[in-house]
């Protein structure tokens, strides 16, 4: 394994320390709870939005803390749900008179940690609600979840509720918006290689030189099938067909199209996928209204990509277009 790592057990704390030091005016780091929060938070005039999940998916979620996005993130170790007390203490620190919204990608460990933290926070008199994200169409149930997994589509939920929160929306309204966005968001991914967690020191699974994993999960979970490597257009068609046929998306729809890198794919290759997906959607009578190409939810150093579509309406598109400022990007 060749990585820029000191002690593998300190991989996440070392990353969070660097992230905070690079953004001293906007972020605050609380090492005890792996907590990255907006400097000066919580804001009493808005609902606080928190997401956790495991590390290894950066920029999700610690690098999406900022104006118009998350108020705080408290990740666990690589590919591991945050401990319940991290979520509970983060919820207490971020408690706002307008309430707290917890965003949870649909994995069993994350659900348990956040649901228990919500119960404890409510017993302290904190108003808190939880929203589950499950955009992955690859499999109905997977290694770590009951029901569909939450993957790169979580970005669109974060972005929409973050914008609405900045505008002063109530907690109930944020739940409505988040559930609406989740209901019209679908994702499918393909892996070309495995990934290597620092603590393991070797690839999480084996793929032959001419093999791909169709429908891979962001923790390396198996997808629909193991297949032979083919052309970029054919792999794009595989992801697009799975996504379009699931909702389904139909002629006349206006969509946001995301091609998300899984950590080890050059941006040039992502644009190759995007170009064919755009052409194919146009051929089907589906209009691409907003475009996203880059790394939004990764799987460490995995070579691969996922394709996400969101069916737009005026409300969702307006929220996605609202300005946001986070550590590494401006959306």
Image (tube, helix red, strand yellow):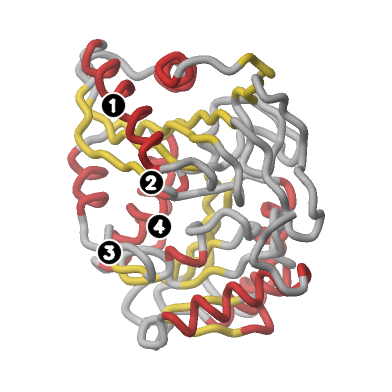
Would residue 242 be visible to someone looking at this image? Answer: no
Horizontal and vertical percent position of residue 329: 33, 63
Relative to 122, is 108 above or below? above
Q: Nearer the viewer, residue 85 or 13?
A: 13
Where residue 108 appears, as percent x and y from the top left, is 73, 46
Sooner in the amino-acid sequence: mark 1 or mark 4: 4
* Cα separation between marks 3 and 2: 17 Å
Evaluate if marks 2 and 1 touch, with contact meaning CB atoms under 8 Å apart.
Answer: no
Q: Residues within 10 Å of mark 1 (few under 14, many from 20)?
A: some
Up-down relation of residue 236 to residue 4 (above or below): above
Spatial separation of the CA atoms under disc 2 and disc 4: 32 Å
Q: Who comes first in sequence, dot 2 or dot 4?
A: 4
Residue at x 70%, y 57% (from the top left corner): 2
Q: Which mark is residue 324?
A: 3
Q: Estimate the x, y position of residue 245 in percent, counting from the top left.
A: 43, 14
**327 or 167, which lies in front?**
327
Element type at marker 1? helix
Q: Disc 2 designates what residue?
A: 294
Q: Residue at x 38, y 40 (%)?
A: 180
Rendered-image quadrant of the N terminus: bottom right
């Amino acid at each position: 394994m060749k990585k820029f790592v000191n002690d593998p057990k300190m991989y996440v704390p070392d990353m969070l320390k660097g992230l905070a030091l690079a953004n001293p005016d906007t972020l605050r780091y609380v090492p005890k709870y792996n907590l990255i929060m907006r400097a000066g938070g919580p804001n009493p005039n808005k609902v606080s939005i928190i997401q956790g999940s495991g590390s290894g998916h950066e920029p999700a979620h610690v690098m999406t803390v900022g104006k118009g996005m998350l108020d705080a993130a408290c990740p666990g170790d690589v590919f591991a749900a945050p401990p319940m007390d991290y979520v509970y203490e983060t919820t207490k620190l971020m408690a706002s008179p307008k309430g707290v919204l917890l965003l949870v990608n649909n994995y069993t460990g994350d659900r348990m940690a956040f649901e228990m933290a919500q119960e404890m926070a409510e017993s302290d008199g904190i108003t808190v609600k939880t929203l589950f994200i499950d955009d992955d169409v690859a499999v109905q149930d997977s290694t770590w979840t009951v029901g569909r997994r939450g993957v790169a589509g979580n970005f669109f939920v974060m972005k929409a509720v973050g914008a609405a929160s900045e505008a002063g929306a109530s907690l109930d309204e944020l739940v409505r918006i988040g559930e609406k966005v989740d209901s019209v968001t679908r994702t499918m991914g393909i892996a070309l290689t495995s990934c290597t967690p620092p603590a393991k020191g070797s690839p999480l699974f084996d793929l032959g030189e001419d093999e791909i994993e169709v429908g891979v999960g962001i923790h390396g979970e198996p997808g629909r099938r193991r297949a032979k490597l083919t052309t970029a257009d054919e792999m794009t068609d595989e992801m697009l067909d799975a996504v379009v046929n699931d909702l389904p998306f139909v002629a006349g729809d206006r969509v946001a199209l995301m091609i998300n890198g899984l950590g080890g794919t050059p941006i040039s290759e992502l644009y190759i996928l995007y170009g064919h997906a755009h052409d194919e959607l146009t051929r089907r009578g589906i209009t691409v209204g907003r475009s996203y190409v880059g790394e939004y939810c990764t799987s460490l150093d995995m070579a691969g990509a996922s394709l996400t579509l969101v069916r737009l309406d005026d409300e969702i598109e307006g929220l996605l277009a609202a300005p946001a400022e986070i550590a590494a990007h401006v959306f």
